[in-house]
Image: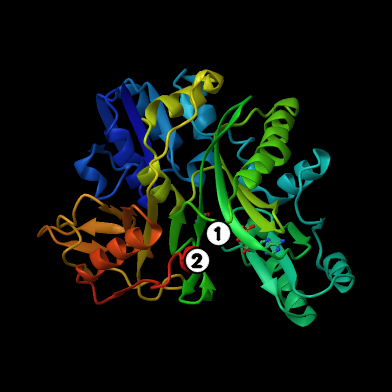
Amino acid sequence: MNILLIGSGGREHALAWKIRQSPLVKRLVIAPGNPGMAELGEIHNLKVTDVAGLVTLAKDIAADLVVVGPEAALAEGIADALKTVGIPCFGPSQKAAQLESSKAFTKDFCKRYDIPTADYQTFTDADSAKAYLKTLPAPYIIKADGLAAGKGVAISPDLQDANAEVEAMFGGRYGAASSKIVIEEFMTGEEASIFALCDGETALLFGYAQDHKRAFDGDTGPNTGGMGTYSPAPVVTKAILDQTQTEILDPTLKGMKADGLPYTGVLYAGLMIENGHGRLVEYNARFGDPECQVLMLRLKSDLVPYLLAAAKGKLKEMPLPEWHDEAAVCVVYAAQGYPDSPVSGSIIRGAEQDFGSDVVVFHAGTKRLEDGKLAAAGGRVLNICARGKTFPEARAAAYAAIEKIDWPMGFFRSDIGWRAL
Ligand code: AMP
Ligand code: GLY
């Protein structure tokens, strides 16, 4: 098989690493990729939003499957464009990807199909939004409707701050993404990320993890795209997985199909779990980053037949995926200043040494300089991932590896997985 993989982050490096292990794969082409992925496939320097360019590339390499990593490509309509040329795509259509790209769409959808989530109202003007806030208890959750690079959610401690957030969002803080906003009930509990592969009809559970969204130790500091993950996560019990399947995933697949928007690809349910019951915080139309990294370390089955079955509507024929018993952890090594203004260009030494068979380092935001050195080129720069018989062993291996990397301009959290310890 020839596969085109779209994306350039740690999530896509992890997908490439796993895809490369499949005996089914003859050629792996990656656009735009990163220096770490260059060892696994052929790199083509195309933007993930260059739909026409990507379709041409898929045709040129006679791709049997296109695997889409990031939401930006989905929101741009890559799956729809590939459909018109008859190339199977792992990833939803632009309209189905609204489960991630529009919070209002998803909240309305959940209400119609009775999927457990926080109560909410949608607004397009500040006065009505502020009047609604007055009726709610603190704290307040205010969300930009559209994609805002993971930053479009405000948690306001008091009414004054909440009103200011509403003004800022309608004032264009996230451009068109915040011309509509969602205000919702504040949920308490523990968060977890649960993944399902979908083929328009069937949702097949495909692993879970817990992420640390805050930048600094003790879950303090600004929200980020995720500073570290681990799997399995004790909060995700068999009962939670069953409930997620029957109350959240199954009605979603059924509802999307009934609405004429069958959902294909991976559905990432962000859950809030309280008293043994999960409610949906949000959907994403892609794998989590860095959740994907720990899933790929734990997945024992060949990934490729699953991606292909999802793209071709054949998930029902697939056996349940097999997982390694070991625990996996991913520690994000970020550039100082992340998430607000990461310092770019600093030199990283020792990231590409042999760390032993239990450790894998994925590149998330690196570049190769002309002299061959590796440099930071993003906010989240490296993902130090490890597997271990127990979670403490996996964690110790990841932190031992990070200590061997010489990068004074980087920082990481030293408490990834504290809940599981
Ligand atoms: P989202 O982008 O919707 O996942 O929101 C980002 C983060 O905000 C989530 O991971 C939660 O930590 C928090 N959050 C979002 N919605 C709620 C809610 N209704 N109640 C409590 N926390 C929330
Ligand atoms: N790690 C959270 C996300 O991918 O959205």
Q: Tell me if I can see residue 265 in this picture.
A: yes
Q: Assess disc 1: are there few (<14), some (14-19) or many (≥20) residues with their C-alpha within 10 Å of its C-alpha.
A: few
Give the left or right position of residue 255, taking residue 35 as reference.
right
For image coordinates 50% across by 64% down, the residue present is 212
| Nearer to me, 239 or 416 | 239
Q: Which mark is residue 150?
A: 1
| Nearer to me, 414 or 263 | 414
Q: Secondary structure at mark 2?
A: loop
Give the left or right position of residue 13, taking residue 192 as reference.
left
- Tell me, yes or no, whether the two marked residues, 2 and 1, touch with CB atoms within 8 Å: yes
| Nearer to me, 143 or 242 | 242
Whether disc 1's CB lies below 8 Å from ligand 2 is answered yes
| Three-letter code, disc 2 | Thr
Q: Picture quarter containing residue 183?
A: bottom right
- Residue 267 image position (x, y, % from top left): 57, 40
Give the left or right position of residue 133, taking residue 41 as reference.
right
**Residue 2 versus residue 358 in the image, above or below:** above
**Residue 99 versus residue 87 in the image, above or below:** below
For image coordinates 26% across by 52% down, the residue present is 358
- Residue 355 image position (x, y, % from top left): 19, 57
Q: Secondary structure at mark 1?
A: loop
Q: Which residue is mark 2?
A: 224
Q: Picture quarter containing residue 204?
A: top right
Viewport quadrant of the N terminus: top left
First in sequence, mark 2 or 1: give its number.
1
- Residue 143 image position (x, y, % from top left): 69, 61
**Residue 356 versus residue 151 in the image, above or below:** above
**Residue 181 versus residue 310 in the image, above or below:** below
For image coordinates 25% across by 27% down, the residue present is 27
Q: Which mark is residue 57?
A: none
| Three-letter code, disc 1 | Gly
